[in-house]
């Protein structure tokens, strides 16, 4: 469920005090986006009932938003019990409770960080996220943060001259995609572009990591797979490009295994070992570079005519799949009528 987001978090104490349990504890969350909590007046998917609103369309992206007048008022919620008090003031939430142990503290923060936004998402038009979480136990004030030992810097150094050269190369390579030529390569590039977009548009590098892996796997599939023996086709195709067995088995085959077995194409609720997850996260940092190199190699070879992609599976639907699609569209039309 959260396989790719379960990085180790710590209670980073700010004032030098120690945790003492049992004790009074307080959790503080900052939600986003502010538009759905009434703290920001900007176009969004939150359309306030019985108010004037301006509907806005970005004709470049096709995305509709709305801006209500007057805007959504700031949300105010207070919920009390004998041992707890929850106060939502706009996009800021404070929860006071009696805490018996560090385990209860961790469980409470985990529930508010991951489960509460998922519950809110059912009825909030703009899906909420938690920007940060902090709190206190007794006199100890802390921030709930990623463990610094697990931080990994994944950056590429570049110069303006190099980027200009890359842009010129991209323009020069465009003709190989004229008409229906190299359609599979174009699709693979689109999947990789989607993977990179997903890796940067989440609230963290890992929010859409499962979907990023899925698109990596699609890249390999559409580039090399031409039969039901997916991994063997990958090995043959990558070897034809000059990759060694070590590179093939170490850099690419694991992506197909992750897709099938580790919470990507198929849902999982299992909890994996923390040390195993750290290896997995570090490995996925490495994979991006390997795929960039793969596409660069293929593009150069296709351009100079020294490499032709395998035809593989037909890009057209066969008779059975078309019948299935026709039935599906018919069902959809019924629901839309």
Image: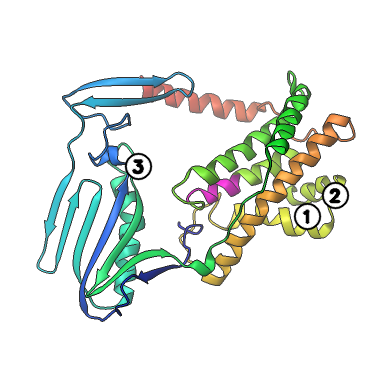
Q: Residue furthest left?
A: 82
What residue do we see at 24% from left, 42% from top? 37
| Label 3 Cα neighbours within 10 Å, binned few <14 / some 14-19 / many ≥20 | some
| Label 2 Cα neighbours within 10 Å, binned few <14 / some 14-19 / many ≥20 | some
Q: Quadrant of residue 283?
A: bottom right
| Label 1 Cα neighbours within 10 Å, binned few <14 / some 14-19 / many ≥20 | some
Q: Is residue 314 above or below residue 87?
A: above
- Residue 172, x across and y down, in percent: 77, 25
What residue do we see at 45% from left, 60% from top? 269
> In the displayed structure, does residue 240 sit left or right of residue 116?
right
Distance Cα–Cα, label 1 vs label 2: 8 Å
- Residue 134, x across and y down, in percent: 31, 62
> In the displayed structure, does residue 108 sit left or right of residue 307?
left
Question: Disc 1, disc 2: CB below 8 Å?
Answer: yes
Please tell me the numbered disc located at residue 248.
Answer: 1
Q: Is residue 273 visible?
A: no
Q: Earlier in the sequence, mark 1 or mark 2?
A: 2
What residue do we see at 73% from left, 18% from top? 179
Distance Cα–Cα, label 1 vs label 3: 39 Å
Q: Earlier in the sequence, mark 3 or mark 2?
A: 3
Residue assigned mark 2:
239
Q: Nearer the viewer, residue 122 or 34?
A: 34
Question: Disc 3, disc 2: CB below 8 Å?
Answer: no
Q: Earlier in the sequence, mark 1 or mark 3?
A: 3
Q: In this picture, which residue range is highlighted in magenta?
A: 207-214
- Residue 304, x across and y down, in percent: 88, 31
């Amino acid at each position: 469920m959260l396989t790719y987001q379960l990085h180790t978090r710590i209670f980073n104490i700010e004032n030098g005090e120690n945790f003492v349990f049992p004790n009074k504890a307080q959790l503080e969350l900052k939600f986003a986006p502010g538009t759905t909590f009434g703290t920001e007046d900007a176009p969004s998917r939150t359309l306030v009932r019985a108010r004037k609103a301006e509907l806005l369309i970005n004709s470049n992206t096709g995305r509709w938003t709305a801006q209500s007048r007057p805007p959504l008022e700031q949300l105010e919620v207070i919920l009390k019990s004998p041992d707890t008090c929850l106060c939502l003031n706009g996009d800021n939430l404070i929860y006071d409770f009696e805490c018996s142990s560090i385990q209860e503290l961790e469980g409470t923060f985990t529930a508010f960080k991951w489960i509460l936004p998922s519950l809110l998402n059912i009825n909030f038009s703009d899906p909420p996220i938690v920007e940060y979480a902090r709190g206190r136990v007794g006199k100890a004030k802390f921030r709930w943060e990623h463990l610094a030992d697990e931080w990994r810097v994944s950056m590429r150094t570049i110069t303006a001259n190099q980027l200009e050269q890359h842009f010129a190369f991209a323009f020069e390579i465009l003709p190989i995609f004229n008409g229906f030529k190299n359609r599979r390569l174009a699709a693979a590039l689109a999947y990789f572009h989607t993977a990179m977009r997903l890796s940067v548009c989440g609230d963290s590098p890992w929010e859409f990591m499962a979907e990023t892996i899925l698109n990596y796997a699609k890249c390999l599939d559409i580039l090399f797979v031409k039969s039901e023996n997916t991994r063997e086709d990958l090995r043959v195709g990558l070897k034809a490009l000059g990759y060694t067995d070590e590179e093939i088995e170490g850099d690419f085959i694991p992506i197909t295994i992750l897709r099938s077995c580790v919470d990507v194409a198929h849902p999982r609720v299992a909890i994996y070992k923390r040390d195993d997850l750290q290896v997995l996260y570090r490995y996925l940092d490495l994979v991006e570079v390997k795929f960039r190199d793969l596409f660069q190699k293929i593009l150069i070879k296709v351009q100079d005519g020294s490499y032709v992609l395998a035809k593989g599976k037909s890009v057209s639907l066969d008779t059975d799949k078309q019948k299935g699609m026709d039935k599906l569209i018919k069902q959809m039309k019924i629901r839309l009528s």
